[in-house]
Each structure stands twice: as structure tokens, then as C-alpha cells.
Amino acid sequence: MASRVLFFVVAMVFAAGTAIVAQQHSYTQEDINAGAKLYEANCGNCHGENGDRIVGIDFSKGTFKTAKSDDDLIRVIRNGVPNSGMPSSPYSEVQANTVVAYMRSLVGKTGNLSVPATASLTGDAARGKTLFEGKGDCVRCHAINGVGGTSGPDLVPAAGGRGGQAGGRGGVPGVPGAAAPPAGGAPPAAGAAAGAGRGGRGGGAPGAAGAPRGGAAGAPRGGAAGAPAGGGGARGAAAPNPQQIERSIVDPSAEMAAQYRVYQVVTKANVTARGTLLNQDTFSVQMRDSSDKLLSFWKADLKDYGFMPSLMPSYKDVLTQQEVADVVSYLISLRSN
Amino acid sequence: MIIRRVLLFIILVASVAGAQVPYDRILRASAEPANWLTYSGNYNGNRYSTLTQITTDNVKNLELQWVLQVQQRGNSDKWEASPLVVDGVVYTVRPPNDVVAVDGVTGRVFWTYNHNPAQAARVCCGRVNRGLAILGTTLFMGTIDGRLLAINSKNGALLWNVPVGAPEAGYSVTVAPLVVKDKVIVGPAGGEYGIRGFIAAYSPTDGKELWRFNTIPAPGEPGSQTWSGDAWKTGGGSIWTTGSYDAELNLTYWGVGNPGPDWNGDGRPGDNLYTDSVVALDADTGKLKWHYQFTPHDEFDFDATQNAVLADIPWQGTVRKVMMWANRNGMWYVLDRTNGQFLSGKPFTRVNWLDGFDANGRPKRVLEPTADGTLVYPNNQGATNWYPPSYSPRTGLFYIPAWVDTSSIYRKNPGNPPAYAEGAQFTGIFPTVNFGTDTVGALAANATNTRFTSGSAGAVLAFDPKTGEKKWTFAMTDVTDAGILTTSANVLFSGGREGYFYALDARDGKLLWKTQLGGQIASGPITYMASGRQYVTVAAGNAMFVFAVKQ
């Protein structure tokens, strides 16, 4: 499932006529800092803080429409692209070079994921296997190489292929394209909005309840939280990292990208469908069910619709930190085999 | 009877002489609803039509009549133009700056005029154009490379082409011009490039500039005390939505854009007039009669670039000449348009940047960007924006296309505003833009929408301006950049980013009809009549779609 999603993402990138361009030049921190200022002043308004706001272009993945090299990027920055929204700029070659330096520094930027404390513990794969099959009872739901339960996703699909690590339901966040799910809660900005926004609707009196002084509601640098989408991409084509696997074990219900959550609709005729939400609008929802059927419903025909909580239980209080590290090591060892 | 006579007249004119639009026809545009003679359909800016062939009963039978497609489209282009309709001929602008004359019944093209903008053109937010103006047989179009063009409406021939502002310094013209009497009025966009904005009137015969009102006063000019040092030279104050006009007062009303730089005001202490203001100008001289500033010393990019909607409504016992204004800053206002007196200001969505108004209607601002970031409602794109609202004299309701409960986090380096460089953006640190409770990439044109919540993000809101009461909400899952059209048959048309074009009952907001057009709607629908049939049209994605009731 996850690997299919991966393939889809990769296919989309190429289908869109874009290309992933690797960095050629090497840059100093001074270049990056200088470029950041110019980027903030001139580029971010359209391209976004993380360089991913324009369809088909994503600086955080090194994805561009026409540029094939850093020199191309400098040319595009200075001259613009005819008949497109990309204007020319008054930058010198040196200045444009610093902007490229900054754009390149965006690649792999992962936002402000909080790293679980245990990630630094060294796990023991053999002990992890024992825990996986014994105390953790993970095999009840998850299969390894086709052996085990089916209610959870196969962690190593039998029919080969790598990268299948725990996608789908309750799966591992951080796979490509997934908005990196914050471990300890919603992104600060979103969280503030969630708390304050609902109450405000309808009322909305000026300066009314809820964080009249911005920033008050926790870490105000919310920007970074929105960032992670980019982080995945090329990098994410590898399986999730240990921190991500760990998080999926101890905090499986943390909000993750919609495509890794289970969406359920119940029609007025009491037919239930579950799967991945692909799109929605005011009047309809589109999803892919567990047998990979593409489904679409008018909301007017539905009794109920929405995301389901993850079926995966949290192991936060079941396994010790060391035991979690062991299981993580075990799962990673499967991948390298 | 009158309608029949007008129809007969139309048929004769269309077949014999082509389009003739003297000023008098524009002035009385509401009396000939078959046509759409100016950006908002009339000088009141209310986007209200008295055509009644499409009703709340038969609107469900609308069917597609024809489609006009863009031939060349850049990635960030949006089709924002409102068409004009003159005696059965539809004139519009395909992005970026291609004028096209189309038969309103068949959709077949009479002629096109292609303007290739200079590569020096700089636009912050896409190569857009909001439409044309017409006077006599001349069409007027602003271009993204800062020019004003006059084109013969019969054959698409260029008559003249004059500069409005220098494109290499960030001046562009995206607004649909406004013709008043014998003048064509426009102003430049470019608020993200440190331009010095203005509103200027040009001669329709040769493009000669006749008057100019500087939206950023030079030292010594009225309002200059709200600036310090040289900040006025790069003070912004762009123009990108068409003004309204009250012939009785001979005043034309224009909304002015944000100050430059957008998000750090430390280099421009003061209120920064006339940014984020409505200015009332004498239409003959361009002299300022009055102004009202919605957002003094703005650091949130709250351009006042919305339609000034004019109406005469009962207000606390007497009928007053008012102006309704739904502002990007999340507040909607009622002002006395004879003198600019503040009558009311109320939030139409969640707003936290002000704590009410003083006795003169000046907002008490409580937030500013900080080094660590300040959470502000509404978000930087605004609780609404340039897309036009509507006012129906029939229902007495004011309809606002809104982004509901969105927020941004604004950061700045205190005391360290950005430096100006000609042609480079001059903004400060761009804010985050948050939609409701999550941060999906809804700004992307083709993004799928897999929000976590089922809460609405966009809406059509209906308010009673007399009481300030919200009458109803039509909620959309995604945000909206679609304008609103109402008719005296109580039909309201709008759309949104999801690509639906829909009709609501203007009285209660109930959905009457919808169709999926497959591209985001970033324009205002209009309606017209040709060969005795009422049409309604809207642009979505790469194309303009035209509907009529199935026969």
C-alpha cells in the first residue's frame, strides 16, 4: 500500500514535467544567510516559506520546471521565465547565487519534529524480535514477510519490495509527501487555530476570547510546522527513519497526513466504506477503499463521514523505552535484509 | 414594454452600427440590464442585475451554452476578468492581456487582440487582469507591464498605448479601468515592490494624463504628516480594484492597497495615508474630498482593495447615502459616502487585531508582528480580498465572499526593515498562512483537499446592513476567490476554489443549483441578455463558461 503510494508520488513528479535537480555548487553559510534575506524579500511571497507553494516546483525537494543546473537557476532568477508568473529580478549573478544557496539549503529541511528521547538509545534487534512476537503481540495485526495478522499493514510485504514499512492504517508517518506529523501535538499555529478558531466562529467580536496577543499560544514560529511536507520527497523514498517508527509505536494516534489515516463513510442506506481520503469538497468526498477501489460519494447521500482513530494501540505504557528501541531496531533490521 | 423597446433597439444597433456606448449609457447602466457596461455592471458597484428570466424555480435547468478557452496560460495565471457585454457582444480579457470579442449567443470569436507584456513585467501574485472599460467604440485595458491600451471595439485594432508606470520598478496595471464622463481612470498595482501609488485619469482619445491623485502624498501634500523621512517614496498604496462612482455627488471612490514594505512598518512610522483607505475623489479634478483609513500603519498586508458598494438605505430613521465595504482585515463597514463618516464596523469572521473603534471610527489596533511571531486573525490573504461582494436592493442584504477563521503568523526584525532595491520585492518576512485547523497546501491551484476537519474554510455570508445581523452562511470546504452576483429574481451566483459554480436563494442561502467546472473560480459572475435569452457567465480555471436555462 505504502509502496504504491510512493510510486504514485514519484510518478506524479515526473508526469508533471518537472525534474529533480541535484545541487552542483557548494555554498558557505554566509551565502545561505545572504540568500535567505533575498528569498524572504522576493521569492517567498509566491513560492512559500518552504519553496513548495507552486504546483510542480518544490525547492525542498530540488524539483524545478525548467532548470537543470544551479546555473540554470541563477539564469531563471535573474531573467525570469517568459510567459509565466516568474518575473525577472534586478539581482547580480553573485546575489542570485546566494538565493540558489538558500534554496539548496531547504532540501531536506524537516520542520520542527520533536525527536523522541529514546531514539538515541541503542536497540537490540534480536530482543526486538522477541518483543514483537511476544510481549508486544504485534504479529496479531502486522505481518512480516506474509506471516502474521492482516488487520494492520504488512510491515515487510511478502511480495518483496522495500519501503513497505508500515503504511496505511495507523502507519508510520513521514513517508513521502506526508505532512510530517508533529509528535507531541498539532503544529503550534494549527493548534492555536484549533483551540481559538472554533470558539470564535459566529461570535468573532474583535479582540474576543482566545489569544488576543498572538504568540501567546505556544511556540509562535508556526511556520516550521507547515514545512515538513517538503522534507519527504526524494529522501522519504527510503523507509521511515527510527524516530518516525518509534513515534508510530508510542503515539499512533498523533495526527498524520490524511492519506495515512482511515476515512470512513456511512451511506444513508447503511453501507459503510473505509479507506484513504483522496479529496473532498463542499458537496462530495473521494476515497480509495481497502480493496483499492476508487469511490466517490455525494455528502448529501451520507449519514456520516470522517476520519477514524488509529486502530493501532499506543505502546507508550506497554513497552519500556529500551524495549521500544529494541523493536525499532528489529524493524530496521528487516529492512536491511 | 420598455424591455421590448430596448431589445428592438439592441437588435438594430447590433446588426447595423456595432457597439456604441456613450457615457450616458454607462451612467444609466442599471436601466438596461441586458448589457454589462462596466466592471461591476453599474457605478454602484453592487453587482446586482434586474434580469428575471433566470428564477429560483428554473435555475436548476441551467445548461452550458458555450465555453471560451485560454490559448496560452502561464502557471500562475488566473482568469479574474469580469466581461463587458454590449448589445450581444461579450468583451473580456484572457490571461495575461489578450482582449477578445465574442458573440454572446454562439461563443464564436469576432476578433482578438494579443498584447505581449514586456519581460520586465513584475507581478507579485500571478499575471492577472480584471477586465475592460468601454466608452463609445473604444475598449480600455491595463497591462501587467504597466501600460494602458485603447482598442477599437469593432475590429480589435490598437488605437493608442501609453505608460502608466515603469514595469522594471514593479508597476503593473491589473485593475479594470473605470470610465467617468470623458475620462478613463486607473492606477498601478505593485504594492509588493515599493511603488508609489496613484489614481490617474486619462483622455479616452489619446491617453493623455488629465489628473493624478497620489495615494502616497509627497512632503507638503495633505496626509504627508503620516509619513517620515523618505518612506513615502516607496510607500506602496497600489490600486487593483475598480472604483465606484456617485454621479450626484460627482465622487469616485477607490480602495487603496497596503503600505510598503508590507510586513515591517518600522521604517515608516505614522498612519501611512492613504494606504488601506478608501478615498473619495472629485471625478473631474481628482481632488480628494474625504478619506477613511481602515487599517492605519498596516503590517498585515490588509489592502483596502475591495469594491465600494453604494446604496441608499434606511439608517436609524433616515435614508442615508452609504457605502458598504467588506475589508480584507476581516471587518465590514458602513460609511456615509457624502462625507466619509464612520457609521459602523463589525467583524464578519474571526478578527483579533483590533479592540473596537474610537469615537471617530479609528480602529484600536492591539497587535503587531514580532521577532518571534504574532498570531493574527484573519490571515494574510484576508478574510476577503479583491473578489467582488454584492448588494441586493431586493433583499436588502450585503453578500460577502469570505475566508472563515483563517490566521497568519507575522514576524519581523524589529527596527530593521528591509532595504528597497528597484524592481525587487519590498515586503519583509512573509507570514505563514493557516486555514482553519490545518495547513493543507490549499494555495496551490490543483491541490486536493484532504483536511482533517470537516469545518468550513470559505463561505458566502449574508448580512443586513441596517442591523448588522448575519442572516445566513453558505459554507464551503475550501476557501473562495469567487465574486458574487445577485439578481432581482433573488438568485445569487458564486463559486470557489473547488470549481463549483452554484446558485443560491439570495433570501436564505439555500443551494438551488450547482455544476462542477473543473478549475478554481477566481472571478465574479455576470449576467446579460442576448436574442431575448438571459445568460450567466463565470470564468473558472482556463476558461469562461456561459449558461442559460434549457429551452
Image (cartoon, coloured by chain):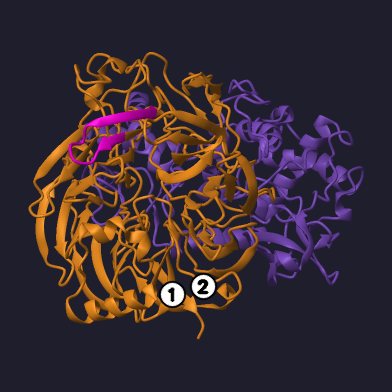
Chain colours: A purple, B orange
Relative horizontal placement of residue A7, taking residue B320 as reference (left or right): right
Is residue B262 visible in the rendered image? The answer is no
SS majority, magenta? strand
Would you say the residues marked 2 and 1 are in contact, meaning their CB atoms lie under 8 Å apart? yes
User: Which x, y percent locates residue B5?
Assistant: 33, 77
Helix, strand or loop at label 2? It is loop
The chain containing the residue under callout 1 comes to B
Residue bearing the label numbered 2 = B54
Q: State the residue in front, B26 or B539.
A: B26
User: Which x, y percent locates residue A239?
Assistant: 63, 49
Write the start and end of the magenta stretch as one range.
B280-292
Relative horizontal placement of residue B437, taking residue A12 as reference (left or right): right
- Please name the amino acid that badge 2 sits on: Ile
**Disc sitting over residue B534 in the figure:** 1
**Residue count near mark 1 (Cα–Cα under 10 Å), binned few <14, some 14–19, many ≥20:** some
- Between marks 2 and 1, how big is the CA–CA gap? 7 Å
Relative horizontal placement of residue B50, taking residue B36 as reference (left or right): right
